Image (spheres, grey):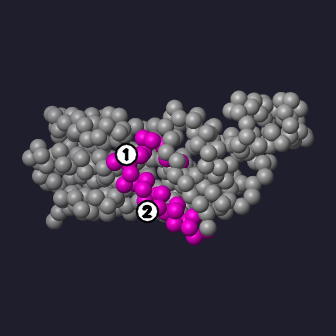
Amino acid sequence: MSQVTLRDIAGETGLSIGTVSRALKNQGGMTEATRSVVREAAIRLGYDFSLLKKGRIRRIAFLLHSQHNTLTSSPFFTPVLHGAEEACRREGIALSLIVVGPAEPVLEQIRLHQPDAILCAGFFEPEVLSALQQTGKPMVLVDMHRRGFTSINPDNMGGGYLATQHLLRCGKKRIAMLSGSLAHYSIQQRNRGFRQALFDAKVHADPSLEVIVPTMGEGEDGVIEAMRSLLELPKRPDALFCYNDSTALVAMKYCLAEGLKIPYDLAIVGFDDIAASAAAIPPLSTVHVDKEALGRAGVDSLLHKPDETPSQITLPVEMIVRESSYDD
């Protein structure tokens, strides 16, 4: 069966082969309407976007969702960006940071920066990923998973398991978890690890002890509201696993203000091992993620496996025990 060619798309749209080629490569010199006509015709005819000529990667766009460009998320994603920058410097590649929101014209930003490849960090809506995929540029997801894409993730489920197992070994019986939205792959997997550890230890999972922090990006209020609901339960938790360190630090600050002793009244463990965790009082136990390694691995995957079958790469994590969960 013959493959659909640029000439076929040109015939379908009435445009020149050069215009079709520039449109599919997201180059300048045409209207968005023309570009959409070409892209829709290519999809309709079943054009194989991998046929677009790909030269050496010289420019990479590091895409970050606007909801991650916050005080609470920056301690995680900034080191990921630094790791990507380090890998790009080593290879002589230019890296540009693009922060986009769900309603923003992401393809216009891609055309403005003219990258040869795209590194998406954190959560993105499926519609945004689909639009980016249609550009035909090599893409890798970091701290995100979606079928059909190569992705680089820390062992989120294994980390959730380690954190919960540690609290169980400290003798804790009622372990609560503060989660963000389970639409986020990393959070969903950390929650799975939490539940699996309880199941393996034959500990009953109490639904009232699992609380989703209201709306990301609203500062400390959502975490405080979640902690208040846990501390008002008839049977309080004696331990808390938080889906990230920023949440754990706010939760610990609130508990200390309420007169609780950490870790005696409530043992607390976070996830990510951001810089502020070791400096907290008491220092925060957490699951260490090599964030720079995530960024480096993302760039390496773009350079060395851009056209291979999508693969899922999982980087190891490590349990770091500090005084917030264990003080002998």
Residue 176 falls inside the magenta stretch: no
Asked which quadrant contains residue 276, the reply is bottom left
Residue 71 falls inside the magenta stretch: yes
Outermost residue to the left: 259
Outermost residue to the right: 2
**In-front residue for pair 298/82:** 82
Mark 1 or 2 closer to N-term? 1
Q: Residue at x 61, y 63 (%)?
A: 93
Q: State which quarter of the image contains the C terminus.
A: bottom left
Q: Residue at x 78, y 48 (%)?
A: 52
Label disc, if present, on residue 290 of the rendered structure:
2
In the picture of the structure, the residue carrying the numbered disc 1 is 70
Range of magenta residues: 63-91
Tell me the kind of residue under disc 1: Thr
Give the distance between the C-alpha atoms of the residues marked 1 and 2, in whole angstroms: 20 Å
Q: State which quarter of the image contains the N terminus.
A: top right
At mark 2, the secondary structure is loop
Residue 82 placement, left or right of 29: left
Magenta residues, dominant SS class: helix
Tell me the mark number nearer the camera, choosing from 1 and 2.
Answer: 1
Residue 69 placement, left or right of 5: left
Residue 205 placement, left or right of 53: left
Where in the figure is residue 13, as x and y percent of width and height?
A: 83, 29
